[in-house]
Amino acid sequence: MTMNIGVIGCGLMGADHIRTLTTAVSGARVAAVNDADEGRAAGAAAEAEGARVHSDPFGLIDDAEVDAVVVASADETHEEFALACVRAGKPVLCEKPLATTSEACLRVVEAEMRGGRPLVQVGFMRRFDPSYLEMKRVLDSGRIGRALMLHSVHRNAGYPPALPDSALITGTGVHDIDIARWLLGQEIVTATAHTPRRSGLARPDFQDTRFLVLETENGVLVDVEIFVNAGYGYDVRGELVGELGSISLHPPATLTTRYEGLEGRPVARDFRPRFQDAYRNELQAWVTAGASGEVRGATAWDGYASAAVAEACLHSVATGSTAPVEIAPQPALYAPLAA
Amino acid sequence: MTMNIGVIGCGLMGADHIRTLTTAVSGARVAAVNDADEGRAAGAAAEAEGARVHSDPFGLIDDAEVDAVVVASADETHEEFALACVRAGKPVLCEKPLATTSEACLRVVEAEMRGGRPLVQVGFMRRFDPSYLEMKRVLDSGRIGRALMLHSVHRNAGYPPALPDSALITGTGVHDIDIARWLLGQEIVTATAHTPRRSGLARPDFQDTRFLVLETENGVLVDVEIFVNAGYGYDVRGELVGELGSISLHPPATLTTRYEGLEGRPVARDFRPRFQDAYRNELQAWVTAGASGEVRGATAWDGYASAAVAEACLHSVATGSTAPVEIAPQPALYAPLAA
Amino acid sequence: MTMNIGVIGCGLMGADHIRTLTTAVSGARVAAVNDADEGRAAGAAAEAEGARVHSDPFGLIDDAEVDAVVVASADETHEEFALACVRAGKPVLCEKPLATTSEACLRVVEAEMRGGRPLVQVGFMRRFDPSYLEMKRVLDSGRIGRALMLHSVHRNAGYPPALPDSALITGTGVHDIDIARWLLGQEIVTATAHTPRRSGLARPDFQDTRFLVLETENGVLVDVEIFVNAGYGYDVRGELVGELGSISLHPPATLTTRYEGLEGRPVARDFRPRFQDAYRNELQAWVTAGASGEVRGATAWDGYASAAVAEACLHSVATGSTAPVEIAPQPALYAPLAA
Amino acid sequence: MTMNIGVIGCGLMGADHIRTLTTAVSGARVAAVNDADEGRAAGAAAEAEGARVHSDPFGLIDDAEVDAVVVASADETHEEFALACVRAGKPVLCEKPLATTSEACLRVVEAEMRGGRPLVQVGFMRRFDPSYLEMKRVLDSGRIGRALMLHSVHRNAGYPPALPDSALITGTGVHDIDIARWLLGQEIVTATAHTPRRSGLARPDFQDTRFLVLETENGVLVDVEIFVNAGYGYDVRGELVGELGSISLHPPATLTTRYEGLEGRPVARDFRPRFQDAYRNELQAWVTAGASGEVRGATAWDGYASAAVAEACLHSVATGSTAPVEIAPQPALYAPLAA
C-alpha cells in the first residue's frame, strides 16, 4: 500500500521534500530521483535509502516502479514535466509556478481535460498551513460576518540574485494571490499595482517593493505588500477583515525570550521553519489522496488562475492603471472555489 | 502664572477637555465656557468650579480674563471661532477639522500670516500619543532604515448617523493623513481611493469601508483602511516599514485575561481610553507652550494640508483614478515638516 | 522495513495513537490492538485497516507479527504490560505513569537491567514538543546564562471524577516534574508542597489547587502550579529564568481574532491540540529509534525518578514541611541527565 | 487653591517628583526643597522656579508657606521626617519604606492615632498604576471568581552596591507584598522564603534571588520572585488566578519592532518608564485628596503591615521554615482592606 514516489529536482525544495517523504509521511517511499546535477541526485538518493537515480527525468516519469511524481526542478521545466506526468497518467505534485505564463498553465489544464481527470496538484502549501486553515474555518463559521478586506504581507530576508523584479509578483506574490482566492472563495477580477519607494538595499535596477490591490468578483479588496530585501527575516502576516470582526495571522511563536534589553522572539531567515508543517501536511495529503486517485489542494486550474492574476498585476505595473484579469471560463472538471 | 482658558463647545469632546484641564494639567484653569445648549454649558461650568458661562462664543473669546481658547464646537463653526481668536491675538486649540474645506482652512492660515505669528493649534492629538512619538523616534534613529511604506488601520465601533460617508475621509481618515505627514516628514502628493465591498451593517446609502493609497514626495506609500461600523470596537493600528526593519503599533494592553475559553483583552468602544494620554499630553503641551507664546503640535498649516489630501481622496472616489494633491506653497511662518 | 505495532488500550489516548500511527507516521503500521472492551478494540482495528484484534493483551505482546507495543491502558496495568514487553524483548512505548508507585517503577527498571538493554520509553511527550525543545536549545546555548528558576503552570479545564486529588501530583504534575529534570539536566532533591485556597468548583473533598516548590541538585528552584478545575480551558505555560535572561513558553497562537469587544484567541479544552505535534513527533521518534534498537525520549529510569519526586511531594502534603526525594543510585544502563 | 509642597530629598526619586509636580500635576506647586547636598537642593529649586531652599529639613516642615511635604530622602530618615510632619499636622507623602523596621513604622502609626487623623501616605505607587487598578477591577467584578493564587515577578536590571541582600525583601519585594494585600483585600499571615541558586552575577556575599511564598487570611497563596541582577532589564509581571479565570499583567507595550532577525520590544532599564503614570497619578491623587484633608492610597498602617510581612520573610530565611506574620491589631482609624 506504499506509494512509490519519483522526485525531479533535488535542490533546496526537492531535498526537503525527499527528507519529509522519507521520515515523516505515512504510506510513502521515495523510489527514484533525478537532478540536472547527477552528484546532487546521488546524494539525495542516499538519504532516501534505496532510491534509484535516473539521469533522464522523462525516464523517471515512465519508470514502472514510480507511482507518482514530485516536480521541484527549475521553474521553466515545470510545464513539460507536468505534461509528461499527465500523459503517463500519474499523480504529480508540481512546485509553484505550474508554468511560467498563464498561457503555458492553460496547456497543462487542457492536457488534464483531455485525460478526463485531475492529476496535477500545485505546491501552494499555504492551503495546508494550520493557521490559514483555521482562518478559513473562522470566516466560514460566520463569526466575523462577510469578508470585506484581506491585508497580506509577504517579506523575504533576501532574494536570489538571478531573479528579475517581476518575480516579486509571479513567484512570490503568487502565494498571496492563491491564498486570497482560496480563503475568499472568489476569483480576482481586477488588479492595481502600486510602486512604493525603492529599497536602497535592492540591486539598482530592481524595484523592491510592490503593493498590489486586487478586487474579487464580489468586491472584497485584497492588498498585498511584497518586499524581498526585508533583511530582518522572513515574515508572512495578514488580516482578514469582516463585517463583525477580524482575524490576524502571525508567525507562530510559543517562546518569548528576554535578554540584553530586548523581549521578543527570533524571526526566521527563510520560509522553511514557518511552513514546515504546511509542507508535511501537503505531502501527506497528496500521498493519501493519490492512493484513491484524487487531488486535494490546489489544482492545475488554481495554478492557471493565479498566474493570470499575476499577469494582470504586471500589466498594471506597465500601464500605471488598474488592469482587468483575463481568465478563461472554468472547465467543469475542476471544482469551483468554495465561497 | 496660571493660564485662564475659555472652552467653546461642551459636548463629549469639550467636556473631556474641561475635566482634563481642571484635574490633570499643570498651570491651567478653565475660566469660561460656552455652548449652544446653555444647560450643558452650566453643567460644564459646575465641574470646572467657578468658570463663567458665556452665552455668546465671541464674548468668551473677547473676555479679558480669558487667556486662551479651546474650540470643541460643531465642525462648521471652527473656522469663525479660530478666526476670531486669531484676531483677538489669543492662542487657540481647535479640534479637528480646522475648517470644513481646505479653502476655508487656508483662510485661517492667511489670517495667522497677517497677524505674523502662529496662534492656532489643531487637535491632531496622535502627535502627542506616546506610541506614535516612539515610532517616530525609532524611525529617526535610523534603526529601521529609510521608510518605504506605512500601513494604517482606523476602525470605529460605530458612527454618528448624521454624518455622510465622505466623513470617513475628511473627519476620520484625516487623522491618519496628518500622522503620516508628521511621521514621514513629507507632504502627500497623490491619492488613490479604493472602495472595498460595502459592509451590510452600514446604512444602505453609506459606503463603509474605504481604502486609501497615498504617495509622499519621496515615494513612500501610505495605505489607510477606514472602517466605521467595525462593531467589535475602536481599533487603531499600523505598521511603518523601513529598509531594515519595521515597527508595528498596537492598542495598549498590559493585562491579558483568560475566561470561558478565551484568552485576550477587551477592545475599547471608542477613542477615549486609547488616546486619553494623548489628549492630556496635548493639553499640557498647549498650556505650557502658550505661556511662552509658542505653538507645539499641529499648526493651521497642518490643518490645511491634511484637508487638501482628504479632498484629493474624495476626488479619486469620484473619478475612480489617482488624484494629485493640490496644495499652496508653504509660507515661511510655518516650520517645514521634519524629514 | 515497516514496524508492526500492537496497541494495548483503545480509549482516548490509545485511539489517538492509532490514528497518528496510521496516518501521520513514516515506517509504522498498527498490526494488532487490544482493549478490555472488545467492541472498542474492534472499532480501533477498523480504523487501522487490517489490524488484528487480540482479546488477551499478553497474547498481543507475544504475537510474532508484533514488533513493538504501545501501552495506553489503565494506569494500574502499565507495570505488568511493560514487564511482559521487556520479557518478550520488544520495544514498548508506555503512557505515563510507568507504574503507580516509584517502587513498582523500580521493578521495571530492574527487569530492563536484567535484560541488559533499554526497551521502555515512557510517554513524557513534552520532550518532543517543539517549544520545550527550543527552550532547552536556548538554555544550552548559554544565551540566558545558567538557570536559576523554572516557573511552571499546569491547568486543566476539568478532571476525571474518579481520580483522587493526589493525582494532581502523581498524574498531572508529574509531566512538569519530568520536563524540569530534562530541561535542567538535574535530579530533584527536595520537595515542598504548598496548598492554596481550595477552588469552590472542585468536589468538596478535593484539594484543587497545589503549588509545588522543588529544588534540584545544583539549587535551581522549580515551582509548579497545578490547577485542574480551571474551567476556562487547558493551559500549560512556564518561564525559565537564567542569570542573563529568561524564556517564556506560551500556548501556540498564530491567529488573533477580534469580535464583540474582545481581541484574543481561543483556549483549548484539553491537551490534544496543544500537544498534537509532540505526540506525533514522539511516535515518529519511537518508531525510527525502535528500528535500530534504541530508546529516545524518557526511559524507565525517568519514569521511576519522576515518580519518586511525586511521592516526596505527597509526603510534604502530609507533613506540611519540606521532604527529601528518596531515589536509588542510577544504573549505568541509563544515560545521565544532560546538564 | 494651589497646594504648596516642600520636598525633602532631591535625589533620583525626589527630582522626579519635583519635575512631575511642577509640569504635570494640577493644583500643585513646589514651594520649598531640602537635601543633605545643598548644591543638589539648589539645582532642584531652579527646576521648580521659585522654590525656596531649606538647609534644615525640619525648618522646611515647619515653614508656614509649606502646606504638605514629600519625603524622598534616605530610608533611615523617613521615620523622623514623617513624625515631624504628623506633629506639624501636615499631609506627607513618604517614599517607601515608611521606616526601616515594623517597630519604627508602628511609632508613626501611633503618632497619627494621637493626632486623631491620617496624614501619612506611603509611596506604594503601584496602587495608582492603571494596570493594577484594572486587575483589581476585574477581580472585584467576579469575572474570574474568587482569587486562589497570585504569582508576582519583580526583577531589576541591577542593584545599588551599598544595599545588603535583605533589601531584596524589605526594599524591593515590599512592593509586591503591599500590592498583594491591596489586590486581595487580605492581610498576609504566614511567610516562607525559598532560596534559589545564587546568580553568579551578584556580589559573592549577596544572595540573589529569593522566592517568597505567602499565605493570606483566607488561604490565597502569593508567590513572589525577586531578582535584582536580572541584567536584561527591569521587569514587573504577574498573574492573578481565580476559580473561573486568570489575569496576567505585562509590561506596557504598544510598539513591536522587527530588525536583525528579532521581533520584539525594548525592556526598560529601570522602574521609571514602567511606573511613570503611576507616580503622576499618585502625586495628583495626593494633591487632590490633601486639599480636602484626606489620604488616598497606602496609609501608615499599610507601611507598617507590609514591613511586618517583610520581617517574617527574613525570619523564614534565617530559620529555613515557615514563619507567622506578627502584626498588631488594626486601629479603627484606618479603613480595613477591602476584600
Image (tube, coloured by chain):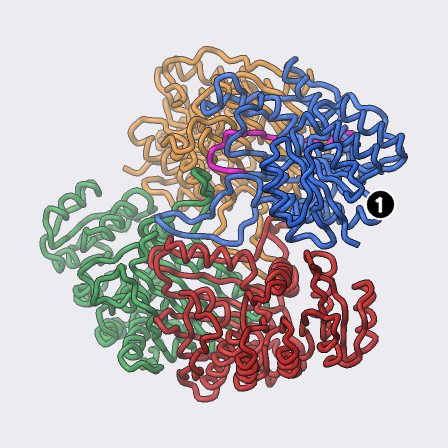
Chain colours: A blue, B orange, C red, D green
- Where is residue C29 drawn, in percent x and y? 73, 62
Q: Nearer the viewer, residue B329 or A271?
A: A271
- Give the side of residue C236 with respect to residue C184, left or right: right
Quarter of the rendering containing residue A178: top right
Can you identify the residue that label 1 sits on?
A293
- Where is residue D245 drawn, in percent x and y? 57, 65
Predominant secondary structure, magenta span: loop
Q: Nearer the viewer, residue D167 or B120?
A: D167
Residue at horizontal 59 percent and vertical 39 percent from the top: A237
- Where is residue C260 drawn, in percent x and y? 65, 50
In this picture, which residue range is highlighted in magenta?
A217-234
Q: Is residue C133 magenta?
A: no
Q: Quadrant of the C terminus of chain B?
A: top left
- Where is residue A45 drawn, in percent x and y? 63, 44
Residue at horizontal 53 percent and vertical 16 percent from the top: B189
Residue at horizontal 53 percent and vertical 29 percent from the top: A159
- Give the side of residue B26 with respect to residue A254, left or right: left
Against A175, is C29 above or below? below
